[in-house]
Amino acid sequence: MFSATTSAPGAWPAIGYESWPWTPSEHSPGSSRTDARRHRGPYQAAVPPDIAALPLNLPAELLAEAEDAATAIARFDAELGGEIAPFSSVLLRSESAASSQIENLTASARAIAEAEIGLSGRRNATEIVGNSKAMSAAITLAERLDGDAVLAMHRALLEDTHPDMAGKWRTEQVWIGGSSTGPHHAMFVPPHHDRVPAAIEDLVTFADRQDLPLLPQAAITHAQFETIHPFPDGNGRTGRALIHSMLRGKGLTRAVTVPISAGLLVDTATYFAALDAYRDGDVAPIVSRVTEATFRALANGGHLVDDLREARERWSEAVTARANSGIWRVADLLLRQPVVSASTLSTELGIKLSNVYRHLDALVAAGVLTEFTDRRRGRAWRAPEVLTALDAFAERAGRRGGV
């Protein structure tokens, strides 16, 4: 039985609810009898409203702030456009790491960089690398944001760690919080899985509209996606990747990924509260949170870029080489890939392996690189200054009260 929650005229509609049957013994055979009794009978699953054609009414002050944030994003993107090679990847990695940290997946910059070239078997680092792949997929697919594109983002996210569920809509009920026995006492029960495909189709239609201010539209798309919760795992990271897909697809960003998740990470409690408010029919908090996160992200991202520029300038002073030497190409690569092997550099830059070692030795002598492997085969090097800058970015993102 379906029940809708009424909203004031002109307000965003709240989610409704409908009853579905539940038999604990079929779903959690190892649960206690007491727990099983608490989860007998039908449960209530959310029914998200169709939003494809809804009008959007927001306070004028919030709309102005969101427009200022969008302008700041475009300016940040344009300022880095001329030197994008070293900074596009590092900002995308930083966004991926921050988005993962919201889900309590943390790893050092070194562990993430090692995982990128196959040197780390740490699960968290591997999952964060998967998130980077999902972000990259979101950017690549930005011009055709549809259900298949969302599935492709999710596949990129989880194909290395959860291949059984990667890129597939869920086929069972999920819930957030409560007991693993059943959904009856959960904090939130997303829609029944039968509703997922149609809800996603409605969502991408909303996301494709051209009559809405972009940052509020992206924030609402994200909140509706989290409400639908279309996957067994990886919804938060995929949903935040959707924001970047929209920013790129609609032309607000052309070169860089603004680390908005790093801004959300400063105060995750208000972020999750904003998602709850959205489900109650109030869109303003999530738009406000994303707007505030954007300003924080731009400040933090700008700080990171400044740190990397300063490191690159120090390297220029410490290294003696011709202007056309391949060593400078190696140095630029280190800004976006601070852990490398000789084979990685050879492949990435098209430099003969014998020449790569000469460049590596010179950078080690100048203090730019440090070798951290104690073996003849599979040697690897890291750029400590870059890793320190990335860890400092992460620390600022996780600290309440600004950057």
Image (cartoon, rainbow, N blue to C red):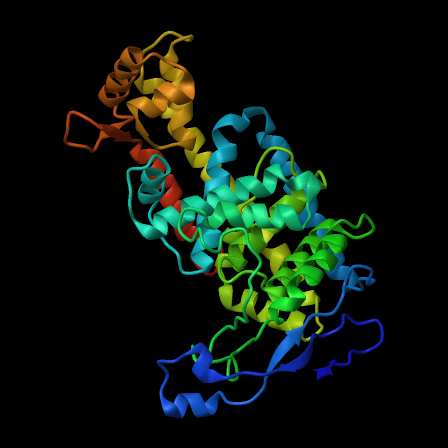
Residue at 51% over, 79% down: 183
Report the quarter where the N terminus lies: bottom right
Residue 155: x and y in percent read 51, 48
Residue 253: x and y in percent read 65, 38
Relative to residue 258, is residue 17 depicted above or below?
A: below
Residue 54, quarter of picture: bottom right
Residue 302: x and y in percent read 52, 40
Depth check, front residue: 47 or 115: 47
Residue at 33% over, 51% down: 123
Residue at 24% over, 18% down: 361
Relative to residue 395, is residue 371 depicted above or below?
A: above
Q: Please indicate, yes or no, whether residue 72 appears anywhere in the rendered image.
A: no
Residue at 38% over, 29% down: 311
**Horizontal arrangement in the rendering, residue 20 relative to residue 314 (left or right):** right
Relative to residue 101, is residue 248 depicted above or below?
A: above
Count numbered badges in the picture: 0
Depth check, front residue: 360 or 226: 226
Q: Please indicate, yes or no, whether residue 313 appears anywhere in the rendered image.
A: yes
Relative to residue 23, is residue 69 depicted above or below?
A: above
**Horizontal arrangement in the rendering, residue 312 relative to residue 45 (left or right):** left
Residue 31, quarter of picture: bottom left
**Horizontal arrangement in the rendering, residue 61 relative to residue 84 (left or right):** right
Residue 35: x and y in percent read 41, 88
